[in-house]
Amino acid sequence: MSVKLEDMPENTATADDFVGKKVIDREGISYGKVKHIHINQKTLIVSGVTIHQGFNKDYFLGADYIDKFTEETLLLGRPPIRTGIPVVDIDGHKIGKVKRLHKNPDTHELESIEIGDGLLHSKIISKSEIWGIGEKLILKVTKEGYKKLE
């Protein structure tokens, strides 16, 4: 817990205040707890957070995901796509799991995802094929349409 210093402006907090807070989205889905706050060294603006989701499951979320911090939680403005979550078709039929995220090396923006749909089989699809994200990733196509994607 930080100590409020004399002449400290309102709405100011230390990064330590946020470590350990629950991370949830607008639907109440929990994504883990804040492990680190990342600050841009030139602008001193928060550039993102590291989320801890359990044993060896840490991942980075950029500032564009963050809506606001409350006393107890970090609220996300939109849910993140993460590895290991189930993938279903537009009708809710199971296809597989998110195996890997492919991001642009310069902008770190998601370009495509790799879906593991069997022991040794996987398929890479464009982010434009994603209909929605939450506890599951929902594709815009049916299971038959997925099989036809290259």
Image (cartoon, rainbow, N blue to C red):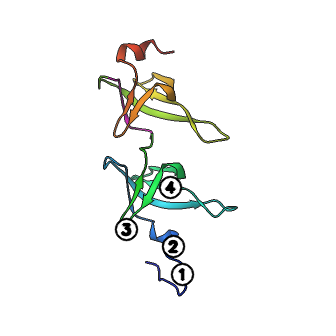
**What amino acid is found at the position of numbered circle 3 in the picture?**
Glu
Residue 81: x, y in percent?
45, 39
Q: Which mark is residue 71?
A: 3
Give the foreground label among 2 and 4.
2
- Contact (Cβ within 8 Å) of mark 4 with mark 3: no
Q: Which residue is mark 1?
A: 8
Amino acid beneath label 4: Thr
Label 3 crowd (10 A; few <14 / some 14-19 / many >=20) = few
**Residue 109 part of the magenta segment:** no
Residue 101 in picture, x, y percent from top left: 52, 36
Nearer to the camera, 57 or 41 = 41
Residue under label 2: 12
Q: CA distance from mark 2 to mark 4?
A: 20 Å
Q: Are marks 1 and 3 in contact (CB under 8 Å)?
A: no
What secondary structure is marked by label 2? loop
57 left or right, relative to 46: left
Circle 1/circle 2 CB separation < 8 Å: yes
Q: CA distance from mark 1 to mark 2?
A: 7 Å
- Range of magenta residues: 83-90
